[in-house]
Image (tube, coloured by chain):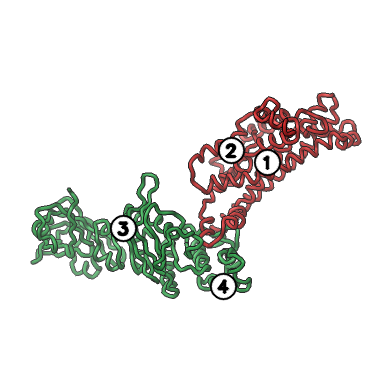
Chain colours: A green, B red
Amino acid sequence: MSIEIRNITKQFGNFNALNNVSVEVPSGELVALLGPSGCGKTTLLRIIAGLENSDRGSILFHGEEATDRDVRERQVGFVFQHYALFRHMTVFENVAFGLRVRPKKTRPTEAEIHRRVHELLNLVQLDWLADRYPPQLSGGQRQRIALARALAVEPKVLLLDEPFGALDAKVRKDLRRWLRRLHDELHITSVFVTHDQEEALEVADRIVVMNQGNVEQIGTPQDVYDHPASPFVYKFLGNVNLFHSRVHAGRAQIGDIEVALEGHQDTEDSPASAYVRPHDIDIQKTRGEQPAFEAVISYVHSLGPLVRLELQRADHTDIVEAELTREKFKELAVGEGDTVFVSPKNVRVFLDQTA
Amino acid sequence: MSSIAVSQYSNYQSRVAHNRATSEPAWIRWTLIGITLAFLSVFLFIPLAAVFTEALRKGVETYFAALVEPDAVAAIKLTLLAAAIAVPLNLVFGVAAAWAIAKFEFKGKSILITLIDLPFAVSPVIAGLIYVLVFGLQGWFGAWLIENDYKVIFAVPGIVLATIFVTFPFVARELIPLMQAQGKEEEEAGLVLGASGWQILWRITLPNVKWGLLYGVILTNARAMGEFGAVSVVSGHIRGLTNTMPLHVEILYNEYNYAAAFAVASLLAFLALVTVALKSFIEWKIERDASNEEKLSEQ
């Protein structure tokens, strides 16, 4: 079932939690709402679920108006950040809850409930925990039970609030891959909230990047990483170098070098910010043909598959960060204190909003 | 008044392991323990022992005779009746108030919390007086009540009203911090899973606070049976009709009938002991559940 979010606005007192937010979630997709804490992503998720009301705007499920539909009738599954398992019930009863509270007419028989619960517990690979109580489970187990419980009512939409936020790094990685596989199996329209860009990039079909109650960009992980629509997205997704520059007649001046720009032909001498990813910083020992500025290597971090360099520009006080593969670094044969020539590739320039 | 529910969580501190570096020298500890014990003996143990010895001074027969005497039976019945009405009402009210305060945001919440505490802040005598002013002969509804032949003051309804007033904070006070600590995520989870308000209350909220609730009920009951001041003002002290046990004790005492007075008093003292025992049992139970949870989640 598809979800359409139209012009949702929400205020808490004087705080604008959401500003005219519109997002479309196509049927069967796994969408991430990504942003720093306080950006309104959880509020938006709760509005989709019906746990919160919007001040303006509407929510459509499968093209049908659902803004005023009761939570109970929305057929959503919700997974809470801190699991929210019923602590006085066994794992089995937790998963069975959604079926047991149904009105008599639609309630499955006891045998049917048994079958369904065990089926779900098998799906999350925790059938052997059926008789335990939530406090007896580890964080990752609790989260999987919470997911099984949400799936028990056969929701049309699955909503997950920071599903892996409270877990440690290793479990988190395993669990998010597992969630992706589960989604590929079930194809249930899912929205999950996260502040972890790596998680969003790895798991989601589509990412909605949010900041201060606004949607900054919507796109596939490839899209938002390679073609960020705003300085915020650039900074939020991965590391980035920021250069202060000036744009004039289709060319951007960064320190001593000039870069050709598309789409800024008519701009008359305007201050701008140029963004370059660390792995798009090219380093040479000698000045080549491409425009480059001089810098001194001030620090080398050689941990993991990549080598990270901190470069002190000769023409500016700024420090530039570069990432190279180990082979490339060996080939260069440079070390701390050496002078190198740096040329940024794939430069993305945003005019500063001065007016 | 001093029996305001001590937070169950104060026990957590005592579980912190004893450590030589952070504990006081022995003489300080023994002095403190000595002072506490001396204080408790003078103000608690000796009077408590006195109640039972005085009650039995003239023999077991006099003791039981004092308890089965018609006025005493009437007083016991009235006390039980007042408690039987006040406790369930305050149970419902306390759960409703705690639920509203802990799970919802609304304007005037802090005023409501203050109002719930009012009976603790007001002297019981004033509490009784309020009802006299409202329902008494010269009170706001006095004339109307007489016309329609209803008796509130100097009658059973007044006693029940006063008892409800002085005991209504106990359950709410006990549940509010507990419910606030538990948050509302479980209730929201129930809601999303399709449970109705009643189902959420019965299946999620109440099971989660059951021990706190029982604790509140026990305190309410103890206070309802033991209340003197407020009830004394509205009762009118009519023997066999409007005397509760504490009032009956006072009357007997004023008539120099010590043995009988202490016999009835011993019942109240016995109730207090049962209350304390139940209270410790529940605290132990809560603490055990909490430490089990901790241990298991550490695995």
Is circle 1 on the same chain as circle 3? no
The residues tagged by marks 4 and 3 sit, at their Cα atoms, a distance apart of: 39 Å
Q: Which residue is mark 1?
A: B219
Subunit under mark 1: B
Is A150 on the left or on the right of A300, as rendered? right
The residues tagged by marks 1 and 4 sit, at their Cα atoms, a distance apart of: 44 Å
Q: How many marks?
A: 4
Q: Amino acid at mark 4?
A: Arg
Subunit under mark 2: B
Q: Amino acid at mark 2?
A: Ile
Which of label 2 and label 1 is nearer to you?
2
Which of label 1 and label 4 is nearer to you?
4
Q: Amino acid at mark 3?
A: Val
Q: Which residue is mark 4?
A: A116
Q: Is residue A282 visible?
A: no
Mark 2 vs mark 1: which is more N-terminal?
A: 2
Q: Position of residue A276 (x, y in %)?
A: 20, 61
Is A39 on the left or on the right of B27, as rendered? left
Q: Which residue is mark 3?
A: A215
Front-lying residue, A178 or B236: B236
Q: Residue furthest right?
A: B61
The residues tagged by marks 2 and 1 sit, at their Cα atoms, a distance apart of: 16 Å
Report helix, strand or loop for mark 3. Answer: strand
Q: Which mark is residue B116?
A: 2
Q: Amino acid at mark 1?
A: Leu
Local crowd size for mark 1, using a 10 Å CA cut-off: few (<14), some (14–19), many (≥20)? many
Subunit under mark 4: A
